[in-house]
Amino acid sequence: MQPRRPGFPARIDGLQPPRATPAAAPAAGSWRPAPAPPMPQGVGLDSAAVRARMVQRLAAGGVDAQAVLQAMGTVQRHRFVDSALANQAYEDTSLPIGLAQTISKPSVVARMVQLLLEAECVRGQGGLGRVLEIGTGCGYQAAVLACVAREVHTIERLRGLHEKARENLRPLRLNNVHLILGDGMLGYPRGAPYAGIIAAAGGDALPPAWCEQLAVGGRLVAPMAGAGGQQVLLVVDRTAQGLKQSVLESVHFVPLKSGIA
Ligand code: SAH
C-alpha cells in the first residue's frame, strides 16, 4: 500500500476549509487524519473565522452581552440556510428560508436576544429561564436562544419549516429546545409562564396570550405595527405592578399569521 502523503487527503477537493480550532491544529510535519467538519459548497473559508468577524461587527454595533456574542460565535448560521446562500450566511442580511419566509439578520437576532437577557428576572435568578419563540423558521434563532436560556419552546405555524428546523437542529443535539407545530398567536400555555417571549413575525396588535403567559419579571420582545404603519420593536416587561411597554427602533419582519398551514 502507498504511504499517505501528509496533508494530501484533507485538501484534495479544494472545498474543505482549514480546521476550525487552532488548539486542534497539528504541529508542522505531524499530519494525522482528522474529520473535517462538513461544509457546504461555496463557503470557501474557515467558518469559525468568518463567524468571529461577524461577532466583532456585532460588538462594534453595540451588542455587549458576552453570552450573546458567544452564542452568535458558536451557532453555525450557514447550516441553517440553503447551500447556495451559505456564502452570505455571515453577512448582516436576512435570507430566504423557503415558503416565503426569511431568517432574520444576525444583528437583529443579537439585539433581540440581548434585550431578553435584560429582563428583570434574569438578574434575580442569575440567568434566563424558560423562553418561548414564536416563528421557529429554520431554527437558527432557537439554536442561539438554546445557548443563553435554560429551556426553549419554539412554535411554528408552517409544517414545512417546522420540519426543516427539526432537520437543521438534529445534529446539534440541543436537549433544551422543544419544537412545536402550532399557532403561536395563542402562545404555548403548556410551557408558561415564560421568563422571555420573542417573536420573529410581526402583527397589528399584541396577542393577549403572550402577555398572559409572561412571568412576573419576564420580558416580551416582538415586532409590531407602529403608529405610522411601519413595524417597530416592542418590549413589554411584566412587573409586580403590571405591564410596562417600550417602543424601540423600526424593524422589518414577515407577517404574523394565524392558524397552521
Ligand atoms: N426565528 C426564525 C425566523 C423565521 S421568520 C429563524 O431563525 O429562522 C418568522 C416565522 O414566523 C416564519 O417561519 C413564519 O411562518 C412564522 N410565523 C408567522 N406567524 C406565526 C404564528 N402565528 N405562529 C407560529 N409561527 C408563525
Image: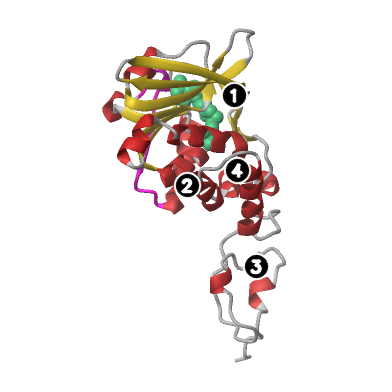
According to the image, label 2 marks what residue? 67
Of circles 3 and 4, the one toward us is 3
Kindly identify which numbered label has been placed on residue 18.
Answer: 3
What's the residue at 37%, 36% (across, down)?
Answer: 122
Quadrant of the rendered structure where residue 215 is? Answer: top left
Q: Secondary structure at mark 3?
A: loop
- Rate crowding at label 1 as few (under 14), some (14 to 19) or many (20 or more) other CA atoms within 10 Å: many
Q: Amino acid at mark 2?
A: Ala
Kindly identify which numbered label has been placed on residue 72.
Answer: none
Q: Do the residues bearing badges 1 and 3 touch, measured as CB atoms within 8 Å?
A: no
Q: Disc 3 to disc 2, how far (Cα)? A: 26 Å
Q: Secondary structure at mark 1?
A: loop
Q: Secondary structure at mark 4?
A: loop
According to the image, label 4 marks what residue? 81
According to the image, label 1 marks what residue? 253
Quadrant of the rendered structure where residue 25 is? Answer: bottom right
Is residue 231 found left or right of 124 in the rendered image?
A: right
Q: Do the residues bearing badges 1 and 2 touch, measured as CB atoms within 8 Å?
A: no
Q: Disc 3 to disc 4, how far (Cα)? A: 21 Å
Q: Do the residues bearing badges 4 and 1 touch, measured as CB atoms within 8 Å?
A: no
Please tell me whether residue 185 belongs to the stretch shown in magenta.
yes
Instruction: Pick whichever of labels 3 and 4 is earlier in the sequence.
Output: 3
Start and end of the magenta stretch?
173-187
Instruction: Report x, y in % for residue 175.
Output: 34, 48
Mark 2 vs ligand 1: CB below 8 Å = no
Q: Amino acid at mark 3?
A: Pro
**Residue 137 in view here:** no
What's the residue at 63%, 56% (across, down)?
Answer: 47
